[in-house]
Image: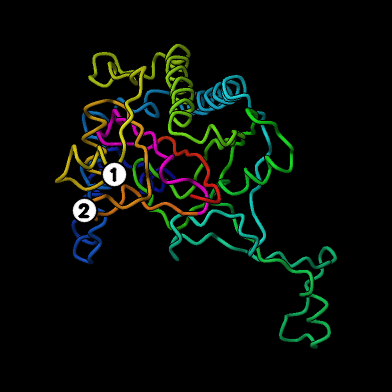
Amino acid sequence: MTEIIDQFKIPTEEEKHRAWRDFRVNYLLPHGKEWFSGPYMPMEVLPPKENWEANSTRRLSRKDVQKASTKIKRFVGRRLESDLNVFEHTAPIAFAHGTGVNDELDGSESKAPVSFLVPNQFIPRGIEPKPMEELTPDERQVLTQYQMKCEVIQSLAKWKPIMLARLGVDVGEGIYSTSTSIRKGYKGDVTHSVIADQWDYEIRISEEERTVETLKKYVRIIWKIVTDAEDYILREYPDILLPGHPTSDIRLPKEITFLTSEELHAKYPKMDAHERETAAVREYGAIFIIGMGWPMKDGSAPEEVRAPAYDDWNMNGDIMVLHPLTGYRHEISSMGIRVDSES
């Protein structure tokens, strides 16, 4: 038994790191998988070896990681309710296909949602139905007349305004949900997953409030919640920090810096989108980029491709922070004021 266990021993972090580099050099790059070495998530974004021990998942036990995650979720949920005047609403996990409620993300085929079929058939327990090819046309019609094609949610961006109207919330009120979605077209890496576990909120505002200043007001509220959450979890779990390690002194700035996508482009004209975002967070610690979606005035690509159906591209943006272990930009929030008939 001991020999079998030894054959399947858990690799060390150094062995996993070396295996990943070998995989990249021997397979990804020779087969044209250059996107693994691009500026979005270059190989160097893997935490430097000297930072591995500073990772909170290595500083805490697996049990404490789960407890800390739960405490953060409860803390943020309470603050969203009090600071934004929102109440929690259960999030859906799927939509019926063709309703137009799901988020199409950037609209590309690769970002299409995961779909599945709900048969809506009554099948007694323990009895296998006849294969479809053995059914008569009438039997097939009976079995398929109520079936539904459904899609796993990709985000609640379109669902939330519908719910505000259905619930009849007043101006200044809103809802929030904790949603879990699948985004099969995304690439998993050190800081990303095809599973998106996030808070979604939506607040009804007046026509007069459709301004960049309103957007900034809500960004500052969210940022205050984020920095307070950092302080809270460090009080609860001070051992997350590795004493004496450079990352133990890194904290989120109490104030967030606002930059438009054009200002960011002008500030770092020779860099692509993710390179200039990384340069900016290294300078400021945390930024909010206003205006995601429009091409630059000089004709170059937009800061990020956005769906045109919900956010007003003149009044939306992302919060980016400096990831203390990788040293690269890390997006933690995307928000915006909704489009109206004119925009």
Mark 2 neighbour class, 10 Å CA radius: few under 14, some 14 to 19, many 20 or more: few
Identify the element where label 1 is drawn. helix
Viewer-proximal residue, 9 or 29? 29
User: Was residue 76 drawn as part of the magenta stretch in this picture?
Assistant: no
Tell me what residue is drawn at x 65 percent, y 29 percent.
Answer: 173
Q: Position of residue 199 (x, y in %)?
A: 55, 35
Q: Which residue is mark 2?
A: 22
Counting every numbered tag in the picture gives: 2
Instruction: Give the colour scheme shown.
Output: rainbow
Please give the range of residues in magenta: 309-331
- Residue nearest the observer in this picture, 266 or 143: 266
Q: Determine the CA span between mark 1 and mark 2.
A: 10 Å
Query: Residue at left 35%, top 34%?
Result: 320
Q: Closer to the camera, 327 or 205?
A: 205
How packed is label 1: few (under 14 Cα within 10 Å), some, or many (20 or more)?
few
Image quadrant of residue 122? bottom right
The quarter of the picture where the N terminus appears is: top left
Look at label 2 and name its amino acid: Asp
Q: Position of residue 337 (x, y in %)?
A: 50, 39
Q: Which residue is mark 1?
A: 16
- Mark 2 residue element: helix
What residue occupies the far left of the structure in this picture? 270
Q: Point out the tag, 1 or 2, that comes first from the N-terminus.
A: 1
